[in-house]
Amino acid sequence: MIFPEDFVWGAATASYQIEGAVKEDGRGQSIWDTFSHTPGNVADGDTGDVACDHYHRYRDDVGLMRELGLAAYRFSVAWPRIQPDGEGSINPRGLAFYDRLVDELLTAEISPYVTLYHWDLPQALEERGGWAHRDTAYRFADYAQAVHDRLGDRVADWTTLNEPWVSAFLGYGNGVHAPGRRDPGDALRSAHHLLLGHGLAARALRSGGAGSIMFVVNSAPVLTPAQVNDPSAVPSEADAAAVHRIHALLTRQFLDPVVYGTYPEEVLAAAARNGGTGHIQDGDLALINAPIDLVGVNYYNPCVVEAGPGLPADAAWPGSEDVRFATADAPTTAMGWPIVPDGLSRLLVRLSKDYPQVGLMVTENGAAFDDVVENGRVHDDDRVAYLDGHLREVHRAIEAGADLRGYLVWSLLDNFEWAEGYRRRFGIVHVDYATQSRTPKDSALWYRDVIGRNGL
């Protein structure tokens, strides 16, 4: 099972999850620093203060990437390292770290894929309203320009936002992520301002000569319980309406404005019921509709729904009245997420049909399991099976016509898993947080062999 000759194999991480060094070299405070240090927000009271200490160990980590044969490494820049207050003067020591990291990657012949925003908003901007405040979008564009000015001579591949649905609706809707706010109107406004920030940043990147611009979503096929294991199952009219609406709120809310410059009517209706649509100003959609090259797809599991007459909207889903969020009949990971590999091929094929103007890349795919080190090895057969099953579906999607350019496993390292703290391990490399020693798991060695043969 061979992949296209130019298929990109890599791995992904995020700044707050691995870097540590939260008070070094002029870094400011982020919303995740504040959130994780607030009792009750994160499992076991964990924080990202040290994480994987990647800030000091990046050379060794790049060496691991080279040994595994990675062609690409997707990492995010910590905005508070570049602008401690989210605006104004640039912190040269913060940029210098990413200078060193990019140079180390290039020396190892690994392409750097830079993500500008993976959820660590400067706390100073949150105190002025955060993403619910329109000005944050313009501050983000300024920050994007500053990072590109410094790294653009060596970095060709740029991502503006990672999973804006999560930033908006888990951060401002149900509050389980930073900044921990719970207001459906703020969540919808934040979603729009994130999109506006993307459009402004994409224009700044393009004018600076960026080679490729990507926008990353946490998309998933929206299915009824019956459709999870039977794609041919025909839903009732009410269930089909629930599927259609949730797909609009999860995926089309972001990709329709970015690719087509329009909002789905379901999103506008949700906004009208939660504070109105006054935050969507004339000209915004034209700005958001800046040309991009790729859509990054982060896939872990399908979204399963059915009609639920009389149910109120879920806090993370403004506009989801009369919808019941259900579970899939499937094995689960340590996160409790159902393992449905063919959900990935269904998703990729649909996205290619709905948005043929842009290429696709799987920018995150992976699983948390309860890994144990035994005699210096981690025998994570369950993760190997998970990755193997999903890569077969990636290949199936390509054969079905999906314009898919690459696959980046989540994650290179075990790390700080947001509200789950350090209880959940997604890495293909085990991290002993007490000693910071790294141990490639069996899945890492398996993935190295997949890359070496460009196939399964």
Image (tube, rainbow, N blue to C red):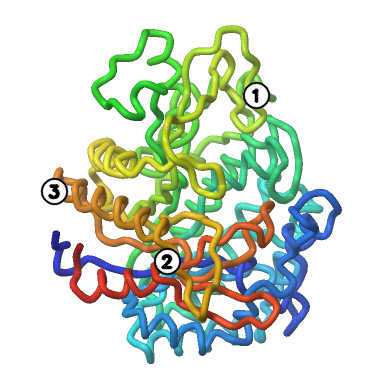
Inter-mark Cα distance, 1 to 3 = 44 Å
**Residue 147 vs residue 175, the one in the foreground:** 175
Pointer 1 local density, CA inside 10 Å: few below 14, some 14–19, many at least 20: some
Residue at which label 1 appears: 276
Q: Position of residue 312 (x, y in %)?
A: 65, 16
Q: Mark 2, residues whose alpha carbon is within 10 Å: few (<14), some, or many (≥20)? A: many
Residue 46 vs 101, above or below: the answer is above
Q: Which sits in the foreground, 35 or 195?
A: 35
- Which one is closest to the eye, mark 1 or mark 2? 2
Residue 209 percent across, percent down from the top left: 37, 71
Label ID, residue 158: 2
The residue type indicated by label 1 comes to Gly
- Residue sitting nearer the eye, 217 or 19: 19
Quadrant housing residue 452: bottom left
Name the residue at 67% across, 53% down: 420
Gap between marks 1 and 2 measured at Cα: 33 Å
Q: Which residue is mark 3?
A: 399
Question: What residue occupies the far front of the structure in this picture?
Answer: 375
* Mark 2, secondary structure of its residue: strand
Residue at 71% over, 70% down: 88
Q: CA distance from mark 2 to mark 3?
A: 27 Å
Number of numbered discs on residues: 3
For residue 106, above or below residue 181: below
Tell me which residue sits at (74%, 49%) in the image.
179
Asked if the residue under mark 3 is in contact with the one under mark 1, i.e. CB atoms within 8 Å, the reply is no
The amino acid on which the numbered mark 3 sits, given as a three-letter code, is: Glu
Hey, which residue is sitting farthest right in the picture?
39
